Amino acid sequence: MRIATCAGLLPALTVAFTLTSCASLPVGDPDWVEPSNGRIGPLESNRVDAGRIAVLDGPAELTAVSRMGQSGVKLALLADAGVHIDDLNLPQDRAGKAGSWYLIRALGDAGGGEFSAFNSDAGVYIIFNRFGACTLPVRRVVAIRLDSPPVQVFAGCSGVL
């Protein structure tokens, strides 16, 4: 009887661990950017197309992180931030689309991963996705092309085990 009870728990525990490992982590760097805490759900209906997200090259990102940290801004028009569009290393087909490029504070970690973005009336939510648990957050800045400036900026990390 005990074995049957324990065997019944195994599927439930497996599902619980899977859901927990896939959830966006609320830990981060609140002095840099707020976690979403459910204000913007990462849904396909509000996903920003991957062609509208760009990671700056190393030196440009370090400059952007430093400037945005000193100024306290969480987002800035690319043109106002002193970063040239060539620093984004965009293929030509992405450089000419409609909308404006914004630099937005984000969180990442030292591991490999990629950024996803979700936009709604509440703001924009940048998630660093990676395989494995997220490690200590690293202050990052990503460029994102949006039709209008977001009201608020949120960021987090999502790891899958």
Image (cartoon, helix red, strand yellow):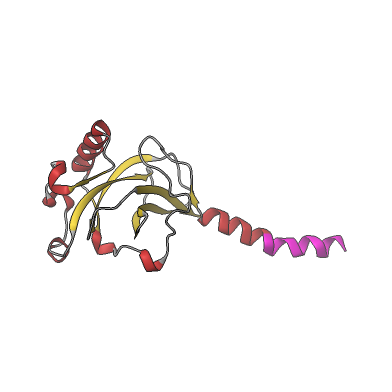
What is the x, y in percent for residue 16?
63, 58
Q: Residue at x 39, y 67 (%)?
A: 44
What is the x, y in percent for residue 6?
78, 60
Q: Residue at x 76, y 63 (%)?
A: 7
Q: Does 55 sit left or right of 136 as displayed?
A: left
- Residue in front for this viewpoint, 10 or 85: 85
Residue farthest toward the right in the current orientation of the protein: 1
Quick check: is 13 in the magenta stretch? no
Give the magenta part as a residue range. 1-12
Q: Is residue 41 above or below residue 110?
A: below
Question: In this orientation, does residue 20 appear?
Answer: yes
Question: In this orientation, does residue 161 appear?
Answer: no
Q: Does 34 sit left or right of 97 as displayed?
A: right
Q: Is residue 66 above or below residue 48?
A: above
Q: Does 82 sit left or right of 15 as displayed?
A: left
Quick check: is 5 in the magenta stretch? yes
